Image (cartoon, helix red, strand yellow):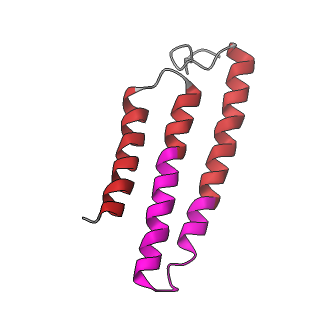
Amino acid sequence: MTPTQFTFSTAFFLGLAGLAFHRTHLLSALLCLEGIMLSLFLALSLWTLELNSTNFSASPMLLLAFSACEASAGLALLVATSRTHGTDRLQNLNLLQC
């Protein structure tokens, strides 16, 4: 494993661990998701550069577009939950309560 692959896999697993173990606020969960998507984007970009193939050149841009859509939906949910519940703590959110 090259040092760049090790760096991106470490960044991915740190984001995944942060998402799994540090779930107190919705904003921290969204930041962990963004870190995961950023590491995937960089790894996919470097992978297409290493292959020197134009077949996969649109894949990083497609992933970046989906990441932007995910970020905007997450921020919209963050604003909606902070307006209705007054906080972004995930323990206060109950799916059974309307």
Outermost residue toward the left?
1
Outermost residue toward the right?
83
Q: Is residue 32 above or below residue 46?
A: above
Q: Quadrant of the N terminus?
A: bottom left
In front here: 24 or 2?
A: 2
In front here: 33 or 3?
A: 3
Left/right placement of residue 32 relative to residue 27 reads left
The residue at 46%/67% (across/down) is 44
Q: Where is residue 80 in the image (x, y as percent from the top left)?
A: 72, 27
Question: Which is the main secondary structure of the residues drawn in magenta?
Answer: helix
Q: Exactly how many numbered labels are in the figure? A: 0
Q: Where is residue 98 in the image (x, y as percent from the top left)?
A: 65, 17
The residue at 56%/18% (across/down) is 89
Q: Position of residue 65 (x, y in %)?
A: 64, 60
Q: Is residue 40 magenta?
A: yes
Q: Does the magenta stretch include residue 62?
A: yes
The residue at 49%/20% (across/down) is 24
Left/right placement of residue 75 relative to residue 26 reads right
The residue at 45%/85% (across/down) is 52
Q: What stretch is highlighted in magenta?
A: 35-64
**The image quarter in which residue 31 lies:** top right
Q: In this view, does 22 lie above or below 2?
A: above
